[in-house]
Amino acid sequence: MLFLRAHSLSWGLAYAACAVILYSFPVFNSSPLSPLLFAIVFLPFTAYPGPFFLRAAFAGIVSAAFVTVIAAKSLTLTHRDFWVQCAAYCLAYLSLLSFFASAITGSFLLSWLFTLVLILCTLTVAFRDVRVAFPAVCVMGELVWIVSWLPIGPLSSANLSFLALLFLGDTLHEERLTFRRACLFAALLGVIALSSYWRL
């Protein structure tokens, strides 16, 4: 956990307070994107502190997502739906990567549950309907549990789960499963499997 494992809980609380204050003013148009704010605030508390360049990349992605959310909230961003969806999927990927990186060293069940909460927050904004996001999160919960037992490492596990999330999201959004999308999913699945370091 980026803040907790580094024993910098005070900095973490200051970060959370600053993020909430910056998001809350003005109050106008704040509720639709509040699930993403939840993910932005709490994701660094669950992230595994890897090498410096990974922490820098993590901080950069979270910062870009926060700037996108603020710009979309203040209506100063064009093509808001596209950028908000990009931010939501980026946060979902970071949630999966943080889970697979820290599940071995931490409490598996708590990490799994909190990861599902973060994914639910991101998909609620991406899909704009919790009735669609909740079944998707239930499917992802089962999939993440299964993928966590595969001996392919955290990065490949996160890539595999995120690929399934994108496939599921597109299928639910289009309300149909196309042959082209299924073939593309199978091909990318094969690429991830072949490029993974299998620890058998």
Image (spheres, rainbow, N blue to C red):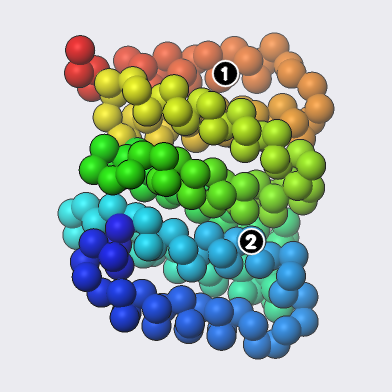
Neighbor class of circle 1 (other Cα within 10 Å; few <14, some 14-19, many 20+) is: few
x, y percent for residue 70: 61, 74
Q: Which residue is disc 2 drawn over? A: 35
Label placed on residue 184: 1
x, y percent for residue 11: 32, 79
Tell me the CA gap for discs 2 and 1.
30 Å
Vertical placement of 146 versus 53: above or below?
A: above
Vertical placement of 20 versus 44: above or below?
A: below
First in sequence, mark 2 or 1: give its number.
Answer: 2
Looking at the picture, tell me which residue is in the foreground, 94 or 104.
104
x, y percent for residue 188: 47, 21
Q: Residue at point 53% right, 69% down?
A: 66
The amino acid on which the numbered mark 1 sits, given as a three-letter code, is Leu
Q: Residue at point 56% right, 64% down?
A: 38
Q: Residue at point 75% right, 47% down?
A: 130
x, y percent for residue 16: 46, 76
Relative placement, left or right, of 31 versus 151 is right
Q: Quadrant of residue 164?
A: top right
